[in-house]
Image: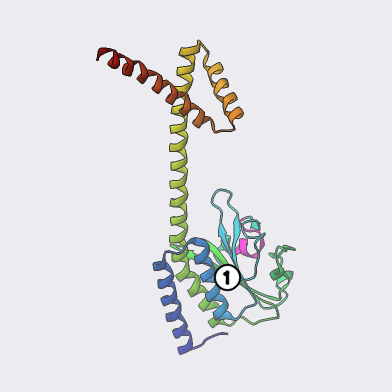
């Protein structure tokens, strides 16, 4: 439902408060997007709402949230920049409002798995942060629907306010992914050092080449069905025990 006059001002204040609470709550990006969908649905009374975010590695925009259940489509529905209405909005940083027969617009790209693509009315709004598009909000009505200037203005206001929250959440998600990647690299380096030490030990004790020593570790790993790191650790542990035993025996003899 659209709001005008004082009603529009009340909605703006309500959105500001909800945005503030959302940002301070530390929600993950997917929860943040669902909050955006929830606000848009509540304000417009729409029949469907979709949110697309850019994939910076491929340059596509990707479906990341939906009012209707789309478990298989989330992350799978993609548009090139400029492709489809949402792709055009992301590229041009402009709004598209289609009151009826939205699927006949020349920019429209139909996905058979999205029932929203059969709906009559569509308004597509860019989510802006610092002058950059960080997403696209699509609001669908099943029947023809005139998008009033107040409704479009409120969706733009919502996009601007939630844009900052989403940008913050995306940054947090990116930093978390970087930390996981850094931890994985550290684990791989630690494993490599252990395997290298075990290889060197086998080379010295059995006069093996580096490749032969590594093959022994791999064969033992397959035989025991254990990670090669565990096999290498076992080799080093046995060697350590072997080095301790003579010292212990020597100490006993001295007494």
| Residue labelled with disc 1 | 95
Q: Quadrant of the N terminus?
A: bottom right
Q: Is 47 rendered above or below residue 60?
A: below
Residue occupying the far front of the picture? 255
The total of numbered circles placed on residues is 1
Against 114, residue 150 (above or below) is: below
Left or right, 171 with respect to 50, comes to left
Within 10 Å of disc 1 (Cα), the crowding (few <14, some 14-19, many 20+) is: some
**Residue drawn at x 61%, y 27% as measured from the top left:** 223
Q: Seen in the image, is 185 located left or right of residue 75?
A: left
Which residue is pictured at 62% across the width and 78% down the height? 46
Region rendered in magenta? 81-89
| Residue 196 in the image, given as x and y percentages of width and height | 46, 23
User: In the image, what residue occupies the spot 42% across and 20% down?
Assistant: 239
| Residue shown at 54% from the left, 80% from the top | 43
Judge from the rendering whether residue 91 lies leftward or rightward of residue 83; answer left or right. left
**Residue, far bottom:** 6
Residue 121: x, y in percent? 67, 76
Tell me the quarter of the picture where residue 78 sits: bottom right
Q: Give the quadrant of the C terminus.
A: top left
SS at mark 1 in the image: loop
């Amino acid at each position: 439902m659209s709001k005008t006059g004082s009603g529009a001002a009340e909605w703006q204040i309500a959105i500001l408060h909800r945005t503030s609470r959302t940002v301070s709550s530390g929600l993950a990006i997917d929860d943040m997007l669902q909050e955006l969908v929830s606000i848009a649905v509540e304000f417009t009374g729409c029949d469907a709402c979709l949110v697309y975010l850019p994939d910076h590695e491929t340059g596509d925009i990707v479906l990341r949230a939906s009012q209707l259940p789309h478990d298989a489509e989330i992350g799978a529905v993609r548009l090139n920049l400029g492709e489809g209405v949402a792709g055009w909005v992301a590229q041009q940083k402009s709004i598209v409002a289609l009151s009826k027969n939205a699927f006949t617009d020349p920019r429209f790209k139909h996905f058979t798995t999205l029932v929203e693509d059969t709906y009559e009315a569509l308004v597509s709004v860019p989510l802006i942060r610092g002058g950059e598009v960080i997403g696209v909000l699509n609001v669908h009505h099943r029947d023809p629907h005139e998008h009033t200037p107040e409704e479009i203005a409120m969706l733009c206001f919502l996009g601007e306010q939630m844009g900052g929250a989403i940008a913050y959440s995306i940054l947090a998600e990116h930093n978390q992914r970087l930390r996981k990647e850094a931890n994985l690299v550290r684990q791989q380096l630690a494993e490599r050092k252990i395997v290298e030490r075990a290889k060197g030990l086998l080379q010295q004790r059995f006069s093996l080449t580096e490749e032969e020593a590594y093959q022994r570790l791999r064969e033992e790993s397959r035989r025991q069905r254990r990670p090669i790191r565990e096999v290498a650790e076992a080799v080093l542990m046995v060697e350590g025990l072997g080095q301790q035993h003579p010292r212990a025996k020597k100490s006993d003899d001295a007494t």
